[in-house]
Image: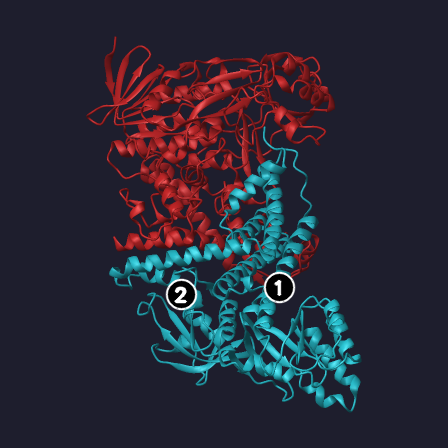
Chain colours: A red, B cyan
Amino acid sequence: MEYFAKEYDVIVIGAGHAGIEAALASARLGCQTGLFTINLDWVGNMPCNPSIGGTSKGHLVREIDALGGEMGKAADANMLQSRMLNVGKGPAVHSLRAQIDRREYTKYMKHCIEKQENLELKQGEIMDLIKLENGLWQIRTRLDALYTAKCVVLATGTFLGGRVYVGDVSYESGPDGMFPANALSIALKKLNVPLRRFKTGTPSRVNRRSVDFSQLEIQNGDDEIVPFSFDNQRELENKLPCYITYTNEKTKEIILENLKYSPLYSGKIEGVGPRYCPSIEDKIVRFAEKERHQIFIEPCGAETEELYLQGLSSSLPEHVQLAFLKTIPGLENVEVMRTAYAIEYDCVDPLALKPSLEFLDLEGLFGAGQFNGSSGYEEAAAQGLVAGINAALKAKDKAPFILDRASSYIGTLIDDLVTKGCSDPYRMMTSRSEYRLILRQDNADIRLTAYGHDLGLISDERYNKFLEKMEMIKSERNRIKRVSVQPSKELDELLEKSGTAPLKTGVRFSELLKRPQLNYELLKPFDKDRPDLPKEIFEQVEIEIKYEGYIKRQQAQIDEMRRLEVKKIPENIVYKDVVGLRLEAQEKLEKVRPENVGQASRISGVSPADVSVLLIYLNKN
Amino acid sequence: MSSTIAAIATPMSAGGIGIVRISGEEAQQIADKVFKGVKGIKLVDTQGYVAQYGKVYDGDTPIDEAIALVFKAPKSYTGENVVELSCHGGLYVMQRVLRAVFNAGATPAQAGEFTKRAFLNGKIDLAQAESVMGVISAQGQQGLQASLSLREGRLSKKIDEITNNLISSAAHMSAWVDYPEDDVPELDFSVLKEQFESARESLEQLLKTFDSTKAITQGVNTVIAGRPNVGKSTLMNLISGTKRSIVTDIAGTTRDVVEQTVRLGEVVMNLADTAGIRETDDPVESIGVDIAKKRIESAEFILAVFDASQTLDKEDKDLIELCRDRNVIAVINKTDLEKQLDTDYIESNFKNVVYISASSGDGYEKLSDCAAKILGTDKIDTTAAVITTERQRACCVKAVESINEALSAMDMGLTLDAINVCIDDAVSALLELTGKKAGEEIVNNVFHRFCVGK
């Protein structure tokens, strides 16, 4: 029998990476928040790879941290191994990635939520979601409890209408053997939420004792570990290595022979899979000329023998999986603990959302994470944070918090989703940011800490520390533009050895540092009065000096972009009344309903002439 | 700071006075690079609202005389700094002035951009808004159509090819960076460099062909060739003598060659009468042939004139050889006289043969139709082709600049991220012509070509 249980300010459905950040942000902003999950033991679960970060995803985690989110801290606290990727390819694309102890991570997150003031974590499947006449949203749990809230954040991941596929076997299921959320799908359809089917997959997990490591290449972590969190106080160390192996002709043969049993190739799965996360059968078919594919073997935790086989996601029948695994060096006697599977789930067309992640047509309802058509823990957490902040702001009748493309990868991610939409699960990539020389992982704090502090998610203490850092950067930058270096035999030797021209006359230290062949470390003997500063200060100054020209160029592009970004479009605009707008542009604009002219200009099918027409119309009215 | 834009602000018609308008923060500085007033006062140093007389230069070459008028922000049409250069050289000269302004740092104005800026700066009576929006929209449509028809052309195919090559390089860099642990082929900087250099070379090549495409709107360099007395001058008079066809007269630097920009039907020609040949013909015949040869070789279009009332001689046959595989019309003149010429021989050597009587004007229509057919009147849609080509040119120039920056970053030993961003900019500049978005194209290419992802 239904009973009324409680009224919250904000309800978050789903306690994965998106839901956690949403709930924490909302509670930290002072809203009474309820966080609902199907299984209380798997809060912040990693149903796929046991790692956080990676190219551009590492950027997202550092941005989440700079805004006061939890993911970076949790990753630092539970890491098994850390590596900075792309070192040598330039600071813009340096990316941090850490292997994570999966069970410890969920423990950390659950405890963090439990301790959070204003936040209640509850186990319960949500069966219904309706809007009450008084404007509040109401949810009903499987045990018939009714909760209401001003705002609801949907962060349902792969649970929503989830269905698992392994060969010809398929059944309704969430990830990792948990229940799917079927009833909620029906409730959302009643609300006219435009749902679609996406799919993703995960490889098998195997027992460590069955792997022959003598045949494998080892991959260790970095000697010097960079934490995700700018606020990290912990000593970080590598605990476990990863290993590398490869598929071969035999693997390929078995897979090709059994392709007919794949639900993807037999047409059973209708969901759209991610292009960047192909199953091994996909890779073998699409890149037939490749002789081998690389496999990473990653630890799932320090207190488990489970290993994750990155690169081998599959939906072939279990016995076929076993057969092809055994062809791989090191896995000849492999003991599989969990079989690889594909999972199909319901998600929304993100064009139905605003940049605040609120639905255009359903006031107070927000979406985040895989529900919005993205993929990846970091992408989910980033959206969760923004959705949670905006749900809280909405509950307090405050204006939404929106990050533009030039501010962050988070802004780029959300703008891409709500402006361009996605035809397959969206993954962040550095190449998706046109401003990536400015949006670096090393300066995420410089770009975003002030926002976090203004919102109330970054403490005064942390903010003051940040201001001190900014001051140090400024004074060091001024110093090296002031002090000069005189030519000397020793310096010329160094310059020659580094492959750059000797000095004829004295130059400013900054001029020397500008040369790509040189760096702070090399020039130390010639910089006698160098102050004793933290390493990241020198790093920041060096990047700013070395890439000055390119950064200025991008900054000019950003300024140009922001001129259109401040031209707001009223919500009640009727595009068909805008004289001179082409039909295609009218339809696209009507669908996306952009917040400002900048967003409008990025919609495919809206031409520069349409943008001009729109600008004039707006000025007129 | 917004960019400084420029465009021809008066209707694109041949002849008369036209205005090149420059608007934006740097308007005076840019104008100063191309305009030298007779009083020697720089436009940045003037009060404004006073006309200055002077000359417009492209580099060191004077192009035209002009009046410069400076408007200072916010008291101008757009509300920004504005310089208007009033020139009187007709379409061709206006285009050169505009080109010089672009070379000095202005970017081409989009359709309706002056008006847009005027509105945004609150300069225009709001009651006019709707009609102006209609105009801009119409211009946008037109621009779209022009680019569509150009897309089918050879030029834009070439641009597509270059763009795709650059996208492919950019995608390789992206895959290499976004999937550092995947099996993406190692980037070879010397190969990348070659790719960039080859893209730059193709673009520069294209920029040259743009120049010859422009010759079509500015006038095709045309030579009337033939041995003495076949009626070249009469033909020249026939074409230029019709008042309606004259565009401008440009006196040749040497007295013996008269060049005229004329219109033969739809085709604009810079017509050269090789009158000089006759005078140098007698004393040293070989010199005359040499001059004719040179003229014919450098011409873009040839009217080879033969006398229907005479039999073929050696000079005629030499001319036939010179015209082989060229854009040429064999004009058989004096059809009103008794036929002596072996026209079958002419017909078998020329794809296009037109019979006329230059003195009576019979056959003129056929000649103009034939010229239009050979030179492709579809390419000579003056308004569309000029605008689009100028835009295309500007985009190609921007792309070349970005590639140069990438190459210099490489030479300096800068890291891949800086190089990558420059190539993205080059791709964006080229994609501006098709309206596609660089980011999307590159990401699509990554997943299409590389086996990446866990």
Residue A548 can be seen, yes or no: no
Name the residue tied to disc 1: B209
Q: Quadrant of residue B155?
A: bottom right
What residue is shown at x 40% (from left), y 72% (from top)? B83
- A51 up-or-down from A183: above or below: below
Q: Which mark is residue B46?
A: none
- The amino acid type of the residue labelled 2 equals Gly
Q: Quadrant of the N terminus of chain A?
A: top left
* In this view, the mark in front (1 or 2): 1
Q: Position of residue A328 (x, y in %)?
A: 70, 20
Other-residue count near label 1 (Cα within 10 Å), few / some / many at <14 / 14–19 / ≥20:
few
Question: How much space separates mark 1 and mark 2, taking CA atoms?
Answer: 30 Å
Query: Which element is circle 1 on?
Result: helix
- Residue farthest top in this picture: A1
The answer for which chain carries disc 2 is B
Query: Which element is circle 2 on?
Result: loop
Q: Is residue A465 left or right of residue A440?
A: left
Name the residue tied to disc 2: B24
- Residue farthest left in this picture: A134
Q: Position of residue A356 (x, y in %)?
A: 34, 37
Q: Are marks 1 and 2 in contact (CB under 8 Å)?
A: no
The answer for which chain carries disc 1 is B
Q: Is residue B230 left or right of residue A466?
A: right
Q: Quadrant of residue A594?
A: top left
Badge 1 or badge 2: first in the primary sequence: 2
- The amino acid type of the residue labelled 1 equals Thr
Q: Position of residue A377 (x, y in %)?
A: 47, 28
Q: Position of residue B309 (x, y in %)?
A: 71, 82
Q: Quadrant of residue A113?
A: top left
